[in-house]
Amino acid sequence: TYTLADGYVPEPELLGIIKTNGIDASDRDNVINIRNWPVYGMYQPDAIANFTVNGQRYLITANEGDSRDYSGFSEEARGKDVNSNYSGDVKDKLKDNLQLGRLTITTSVPGGDYSQPYVFGTRSFSIWNAMTGAQVYDSGSELEVRTAAVFPTNFNSTNDENNFDNRSDNKGPEPEGVATGEIDGRMYAFVGLERIGGLMVYDITDPTAATFVQYVNNRDFSGSAVGPDSGPEIVRFLSKQESPNGQPMVILSNEITGTVSLWSLKK
C-alpha cells in the first residue's frame, strides 16, 4: 500500500503549454516536442465514470482512443503513407518522420474531412454535463506535459519496455481507466495511464475547472526490468467506509506486471 505524496509541479517552461491541445507526434525526433500540430483528436473513451456535484450529474471520460484493426478491415495508417490525401502545409508535415510522418491516424475520416488528419483518442480526460452532453472541461496536453516533467528520460515510454518517446506517434500516455470519489466534501478524479503508468489525481469539485493535485507512479525505469507496477488497466475508488484501513483508497490493476497496487489517500 502506497501513500500519495506531494504533487510534482512541472518546470516553468512547461507550464505555458499545459492547457493547450498539443501532442508529441513523433517517436523518431528524439526530443520532447509537445505542440499544437494540425491534427484532430477523436474522443474515444475507454473508461467512463459518473459523479454528482450540487445535484448535477457529470460524466468523466478517459480518452484513450482505439482503432478498428481486423483481418477484413483496418483503418490504421502512418501519416507518411497517406499524405497524398491532404494538401498544403499539412501534406508536407505528413511526409516528415520528425513531424507527422510517423503519427498513427485513421484512413476512415469522419465525414470525409481531409482538412487535417484524425488521430485516435485525445491523450486527455474530459468532463461532460450528463444532461446536455456538453463538454465542460478537458485536460488538453496536461497529462503528457506532467509525465514529461516527472520522467523526462522515459517520456512516452511504452508499458512493457523502459524506453523514451516510444508512444509519441500513437496515443502517448493513453489515459485508460478513471474513477471518482468524494473525500472530506471534495470530489476527486483518479486517471490511470496505461503506457507510462501511474495515476493522475485531480480535484473536480468544480467540474468546469478541474485542478491538478498530483501524479504518482510506482514504476522503476532505472533497469531493464519493467515494474514493480506497469500498465494500469482498471481504477477503483474505495471510500473510508469500504476501505480495510479506514482511509479512502484507490486500487489499480496493472495489466503488464499482473499486479494490484493500493494507494492510501491522506490529506
Image: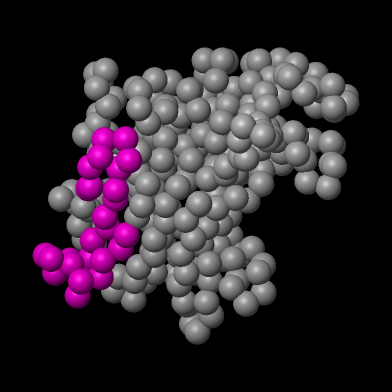
Toward the viewer: 46 or 54?
Answer: 46
Name the residue at the left extreme: 245
* Above/below status of 101 relative to 51: above
Residue 107: percent from left, percent from top? 74, 34
Quadrant of the image occupied by residue 66: top right
Residue 248: percent from left, percent from top? 23, 65
Residue range (magenta): 236-261
Q: Which residue is located at x 47 percent, y 77 percent?
A: 53
Quadrant of the image occupied by residue 77: top right
* Above/below status of 194 relative to 242: above
Q: Is residue 125 visible?
A: no
Q: Is 130 within the magenta?
A: no
Toward the viewer: 163 or 150?
Answer: 163
Image side of residue 62 versus residue 218, left or right: right
Image side of residue 112 versus residue 16, left or right: right
Residue 129: percent from left, percent from top? 60, 71
Render colour scheme: one colour
Q: Which residue is located at x 79 percent, y 22 percent?
A: 83
Q: Is residue 260 visible?
A: yes
* Above/below status of 207 relative to 30: below
Image side of residue 47 versus residue 224, left or right: right
Q: Is 256 within the magenta?
A: yes
* Above/below status of 196 relative to 233: above
| Number of numbered discs on residues | 0
Name the residue at the bottom extreme: 55
Toward the viewer: 28 or 138?
Answer: 28
Name the residue at the front extreme: 72
Residue 189: percent from left, percent from top? 41, 60
The quarter of the picture where the C terminus appears is bottom left
